Amino acid sequence: MIYFDNGATSFPKPRGVVEAVHQALTRYGANPGRSGHDLSIQTSAKVYEVREAAAKLFGVEDPSEVVFTSNCTHAINIALKGLLQPGDHVIISDLEHNAVLRPIHALSQKGVEYDIANTYGRCRKTLDSFYRLIRPNTRLIACAHASNVFGIRQPIEELAMLCRDKNLLFLVDAAQSAGVLDIDAPCMGIDFLCTAGHKGLYGPSGTGLLITALGSSLSTLMEGGTGSFSANYEQPLDMPDRLESGTLNTIGILGLGAGIRFVRERGPAQIYRHEMRIAKEILHHLKRMPQIVLYTPDFDEGSHLPVLSFNIRGMSSEQVIEALSRQGFALRGGLHCAPLAHKKMGTLEQGTVRISVGAFNTREQALMLCEAIKKTCCSS
Amino acid sequence: MGNATILISSVTAAMRAQRLLEQRGIRSYIRKIANHPKLGGCGYGLEIAGDLTSALYLLQAANIRILGIL
């Protein structure tokens, strides 16, 4: 099976991740931050190393600002539900994943208001669109770094400046961009950086990160054991304990640490260039197939991530996925949990076939995929 | 008399403190402290194998919350 579904989760994982997971299961089996025996302290030290590595990757000085979550959705929920109060207003983009849309919509049932900004890529028009929706009670802009369906990047740096200028907080859903784009959260003015650990950071499933200096001020989504202030009935204010109740996913976290090492060794910029070369090669071939419908024909470095969507005329996206699966290719079809993005692009009914490139994909695989798509077109 | 132990809330803060002291040449050991009133229950301590005054100064300068000294 040739895998082009890295937007859902990256596969294969680097060898170091497999080894780290094995080591976590066989060597660092104690509960970190709970006991005082050597193995617990050693396990805590390994977990802390991952916190340091994540902090460094995202430009954060204090590793206590790194919260381990079970995925990006979890991180977004902690931030949104911990921050927003009835009467607050939020602006999101028209490309958001349900990870942002659904918690915001759920909060709107409790008195939080929201608007959806039309976006046009990394340009002034997008910025103006957000600007026009700002109200006196606007508290937050929450925006995906890039669309998980169409790879379209948002003007994150400019939106951060707008937030600073208007005294708003800024949340970035970096599920698709972390590990592919350089992100320095404090420098870029991101108050809440949310990401998956199992996509571009190459960790195991069940890992995610929330990076924030504002953790102590958030209400908690979950309370429970933290190994600290254990006689107190109230959840501690200290970070990351405030937002990390219950036993940590040590196995996932140590695997994530190895994934972050892999990314840092190669460098996000190099990974991005490699993946974009492959994505552009695929696009070049798809453009020459008359049955193919493309949604991002001007796909380019700087404006897109290596994620692209297409359809074949006369076939549903799921039929295409099945046909490609029979030929040995793993892609995703359907709505990709992003109804706003599909509504924007007119694909809410049909969905799309998504190609999401990873660090281990090769040009040869891309050419084989294009041949398989061509064959599928001919059979339609 | 044994080494002094600086009481710190969590294992993450203790790890951060230990790293910081290491960088300044002060060795320390992380110990679990069970149910101490200054910790509001269980927490962690940093046993200092070096100059306590310097260690306290460094940790305070790094905004690491010190809850007491044993």
Image (spheres, grey):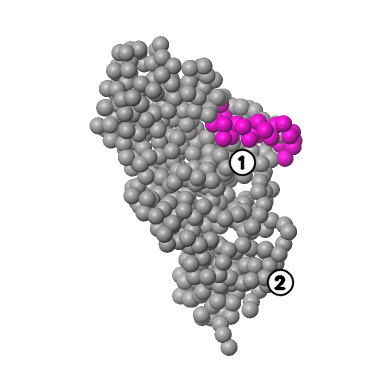
Q: Is residue B28 above or below residue A265?
A: below
Q: The residue tagged with tag 1: helix, strand or loop?
A: helix
Image disc number at residue B37 = 2
Q: Is residue A380 above or below residue A318?
A: above
Image disc number at residue B57 = none
- Cβ–Cβ under 8 Å for marks 2 and 1: no
Q: Quadrant of the C terminus of chain A?
A: top left
Q: Residue at x 41, y 14 (%)?
A: A315
The stretch drawn in magenta includes residue A107: yes
Numbered disc total: 2
Q: What's the magenta region? A: A85-111
- Of A79 and A161, nearer the camera is A79
Give the residue type that dot 2 points to. Pro
Could you tell whether A24 is left or right of A228 in the image? Answer: left
* Chain of the residue that carries numbered disc 1 in the rendered image: A
Quadrant hosting residue A375: top left
Bin the neighbour count of mark 1 within 10 Å (Cα to Cα): few under 14, some 14-19, many 20 and up: some
Q: Position of residue B6 (x, y in %)?
A: 60, 74
The stretch drawn in magenta includes residue A170: no
Q: Is residue B43 above or below residue A173?
A: below
Label 1: which residue? A77
Q: Residue at x 57, y 44 (%)?
A: A75
Bin the neighbour count of mark 2 within 10 Å (Cα to Cα): few under 14, some 14-19, many 20 and up: few
Q: Residue at x 36, y 54 (%)?
A: A19
Quadrant hosting residue B64: bottom right
Could you tell whether A119 is left or right of A283 in the image? Answer: right
**Discs 2, 1: same chain:** no
Q: Residue at x 26, y 27 (%)?
A: A367
> Is residue A343 visible to the viewer in this orientation of the structure?
yes
Residue positioned most to the bottom: B1
* Chain of the residue that carries numbered disc 2 in the rendered image: B
